Image (cartoon, helix red, strand yellow):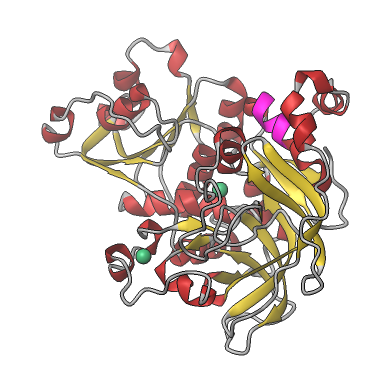
Amino acid sequence: MLTAAIRSTFLQAQPQLFPTLAICGKIASRQFSTTALRPMRGLLYYGRKDVRYSEDAPEPMVKNDSDVKIKIAYCGICGTDLHEYLDGPIFFPKNGAKDKISGMKLPLVEGHELSGTVVEVGNGVKNVKVGDRVVVEASGHCSDKARYKGSVKQVKEYCNSCKKGMPNICRDMNFLGLGVAPGGFGEYIVYGADHVLKVPSSIPIDVAALVEPISVAWHAVENSNFKPGQTALVLGGGPIGLAAILALKGHKAGKIVCSEPAKLRRDFAEKLGAEVFNPMEHKNINADLKALVPENEGFHASFDCSGVPATFATSIEALSSGGTAVNVAIWADKPIQYRPMALSFEEKHATGSMGYLVKDFEDVLDAMDKGLIPIESARMLITGKVPLANTIDVAYKNLIEHKESNVKILVSLTDEPTDI
Ligand SMILES: [Zn+2]
Ligand SMILES: [Zn+2]
């Protein structure tokens, strides 16, 4: 949780220090007033440094047999949301363009790490019913275009990735809350039933909002063909690195080591059950990491959640023979140098991971329900809860300025008390 000092700093923040935030905090005018749409509260993305709290965002409606309408409880703020705010549009459609999956245009409600309760379903929905507590696998791909007939060109044939059962790397892939449809920083969403999963009663609704980011890490662990009892190295202790520790616990990992220079983040990693390593205190980082595994063997799998050339090299060098390095970080799209023979000499593997599948959500919910990912460990990732109206001026600012002391801030659409 945030300390009282940090909290009061933000409450008293000088607007001149954050001129862009002062602009963005304004309340949007009645952009959507039509007789057909009911207004709701929502945080609308218009473009870079222009995200507006509105009490007049259009409430999405059930239009298809496969649609599920969800009243949002909580929605986590993701690094991607901050990137869209600071540097976007990245995933959001640019310059008046339409989203490739849905044909929707800006402004749209942000947010994709959500939990809530089903309030309405289309006639064909079988997997959830009104009143169910749910989470949403937030990707959009070829098969989703059918729900937006009339708005987007329909495909005769799915793309090669979708045909191969890899919709997470669909040619037109995007996410709810990032362009496909209005997201979780609003009172309601409508999305396809095949993306909606019921939450077991053992999982509180705030912790359920973490299922999405933990599923990102879960997919990465699946891509390493991880086996119970194996050893793992996590490079970087930010939100996804910490989620990787939980996903590895869910896979019954043996030793997990987290390498992270920032003390606050190492402390989080340690609380989640990882052994921690400060790379700033070591000259021979790769050798010293390998030495943490008996007989200097190195790790069965490594997860680069930092995305800098040094961590990429370490993710390969610190592996045991035959081990697998998974790049989970999002990099600037440019080349770096690395040593190919580091792979060949010991037949190591290097791969990447992108997003998630519905199966990853099912596995994370199951691991939480069975206690393999303890609820109280997952809850440690929640470092604050903010009311919707304060999301930009308080929470975004907090995450941008005090990155290290925060893991996940949840936007609350509930009546429960918030703390920032
Ligand atoms: Zn996210
Ligand atoms: Zn596709």
Whether 368 is drawn above or below 324: the answer is: below
- Looking at this view, is 172 or 399 the one in front? 172
In magenta stretch: residue 400: yes
Q: How many marks?
A: 0
In the rendered structure, the answer to whether residue 108 lies left or right of residue 34 reads left
Q: Is residue 346 above or below residue 63?
A: above
Find the magenta span and give its range.
Answer: 396-402
Residue at 31% over, 49% down: 224
Residue at 49% over, 25% down: 260
Q: Inspect this view and state whether residue 288 appears.
A: yes
The x and y percentages for residue 67 are 61, 78
Q: Is residue 136 magenta?
A: no
Against 294, residue 127 (above or below) is below
Q: Residue at x 27, y 65 (%)?
A: 160
Q: Between residues 371 and 387, which one lies in front from this camera angle?
A: 387
Q: Nearer the viewer, residue 224 or 192?
A: 192
- 313 lies left or right of 63: left
Where residue 298 appears, x then y in whole percent? 28, 32
Residue 273 visible in the shown view: no
Q: Please tell me whether the stretch drawn in magenta is mainly helix, strand or loop.
A: helix
Of all residues, the one furthest to the bottom in this rendering is 123
For the N terminus, the image quarter is: top right
Residue 402 percent coordinates (x, y) = 68, 25
Frontmost residue, 370 versus 245: 245
Q: Quadrant of the C terminus?
A: top right
